[in-house]
Amino acid sequence: MIHVLTPEIYNRIAAGEVIDRPYSVVKELVENAVDAGAKSVTVEIEGGGKKLVRVTDDGAGISEEDLPRAYLPHATSKLEKAEDLFTVQTLGFRGEAIASIASVSRMKICSKTAGGEAHSLACEGGAVGKVLPEGGADGTVVTVEDLFYNTPARLKFLKSDGQEEGDVTAMMARFLMSRPEISFTYLTNGKVKYRSFGDGLESAIAAVYGADTLANCHKISADKHGIKVYGYIGSRNFYKPNRTYGSLFVNGRYVVNQTVGAAMTNAYSAYLMKRQYPFYVLFLDVPPEIVDVNVHPNKADVRFADNQIIYGSVYSVVSAVLDGNSRALEYLAENEKSGMGYGKPVSTFRKTENVPERPAPVMTYEEAKKELKFDVSPLAGHSPVSREFFAPNTMEVHAPAAKPAEDAFEENRKFLREREEKAKQEKLDPKDLVYKGELFRTYLIYEAGDCAYLIDQHAAHERLIYDRLRAKMEARAVVSQPMLMPYVLTVNAQEFSFLEKQFPVLREIGFDVEEFGGTSVKVSAVPADLMGMDLAAFFGEVLSSMESLRAIRLADLLKDKLASAACKAAVKGGEFLSEEEAKSLIERMDGDVGLKCPHGRPVAVRVKRTELEKLFKRIV
């Protein structure tokens, strides 16, 4: 039997596509405020947005008679006919957000138009109340409380308050940068996180990332094939530990797009090492008819009519600036061309002497579409290459036949048995080792049976110290050492929420770490055994794991730091050890001559008597 769902049910189902988390509530409401022409927007959240989201703007407002229609699904002031979908200029246009939010929360809209009276209308779980008179200034205040209170299954799958707050904060950072002409105030649990004054992109970037960021960026502005590419891109020596520092805005809308992402990655590929990512705040202004913004429920991505031209335009501009060739002068903003702006002065760019430069012909989008023959493969990680260079691949590759699971299991058991037997053979009783002297004040010589053992005193001591430090770390028997000057780490919102979740683990292993206002973290003490460690490098490793390893073990990430500490503390090659000291070292090794130092070098080398006799031609 087929049932026709009631509005109460299908609105809740539809809400899951548009409104999945608190950040999407904030996104939709702020987009409405921007579309209403607001010059000032205030966003407040509590409990990561689950308890409260309030957005206040000074935009055009909603009239008394339109208030009830605001809650209707597919009711919008931004579209009138189907053709309007191909020339969308506003951030919102489908009319789904308010109805979706209202169906899964307790919502209230209070609004006043210029010259009109303020009125409010509440809606609880999709049940709309009555329009009531209110007091208020021009604009709109939307309050959303108890998100998903009537859909407990969805509520159960939300993240912690801290993680949800981090995602809302990241979204607000993008709004500050995408609309630098608007004044934004963003508060979490009553504390101001971001505040901008609507005085330009540079000010907005400084508010989000700090003023120092601008000094490490190039300001670009270019027109390529009818597409405007502008914003700030990090210099080739300015990199970040994860992808969260890349922001793309297409026609003023923040999106995550694979084509542009591949262009940026490939442009920086010659300058960034593994696990390093570029910084950019990049804007693309494209004709509305060549971009489809209606391909994702949250409008989180867009589809371009021709990915090849988009890729080629972004790649050519960014790579030219990073490479520092003469073409870069066309793409740098005026203040950088004069050497007075942020980024590299013009004098450092390479120029060919005495060769007159001819400006490149300016193509329209349609002309470029006919001219360019890029073969774009965003996932392949290659620069654009002409299709003429490719030939059909006729080579057949045959994969080896898979072994039965039982055989593979038996092979694993055999390998483990052999490794265990080998370890037993390589372990000797220290009493059987007879000290015979040293070589070059680096290698200790021992004899046992018909074998001689050369022990690297530094590698051996380093391994013993490393094992001791690791045992203390794993047993949580660590001692914290206060720092003379606290180390302050400033990160973005998503990184902060990730680090905040790791605070208990960091404290267990000896760090004194706490929030230090906004999205900054203060480290006041470190494990005593690791005093002097490179904190910037350590936290860089932690943050580089953020995307793929949400449940990382920080103790594992300390391995390199422990190895470095052990290396510094161990006896060095060239230092003299007395016979008693050498004997003590071998006893602490417990005869384990199969050890390796923390960096993978062998501690001991065994030379059989027969091998020596072959060298001296005693035997053949």
Image (cartoon, rainbow, N blue to C red):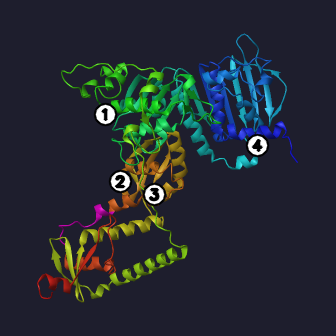
Give the label, 1 or 2, closer to the camera: 1
* Residue 174 relative to residue 456: left or right: right
- For this rendering, which residue is in front, 357 or 64? 357
The alpha-carbon separation of the residues under discs 3 and 4 comes to 40 Å
Amino acid type at image mark 2: Met
Which element is circle 2 on?
A: loop
N-terminal label among 3 and 4: 4
Element type at marker 4? Answer: loop
Determine which quarter of the picture holds residue 333.
top left
For the C terminus, the image quarter is bottom left
Q: Residues within 10 Å of mark 2 (few under 14, many from 20)?
A: some
Q: Nearer the viewer, residue 46 or 103?
A: 103
* Residue type, numbered disc 3: Gly
Q: Which residue is mark 4?
A: 149
Residue 442 visible in the shown view: yes
Question: Residue at image x 47%, y 23%?
Answer: 365
Q: Which residue is mark 3?
A: 510
> 569 or 547, which is in the foreground?
547
The residue under label 2 is 533
Q: Which residue is mark 1?
A: 323
Q: Which residue, as the protein is rendered here, is positioned at the far top?
A: 115
- Where is residue 532 drawn, in percent x and y? 34, 53
As measured in the structure, the alpha-carbon distance from the residue carrying label 1 to the one carrying label 3 is 44 Å
Q: Which residues are magenta?
A: 566-576
Which residue lies at the image location 75% right of the left edge and 32% below the top edge? Answer: 99
Q: Which mark is residue 120?
A: none
Instruction: Say whether disc 1 or disc 4 marks the residue closer to the N-terminus.
Output: 4
Dot 3 crowding, Cα within 10 Å, few <14, some 14–19, many 20+: many
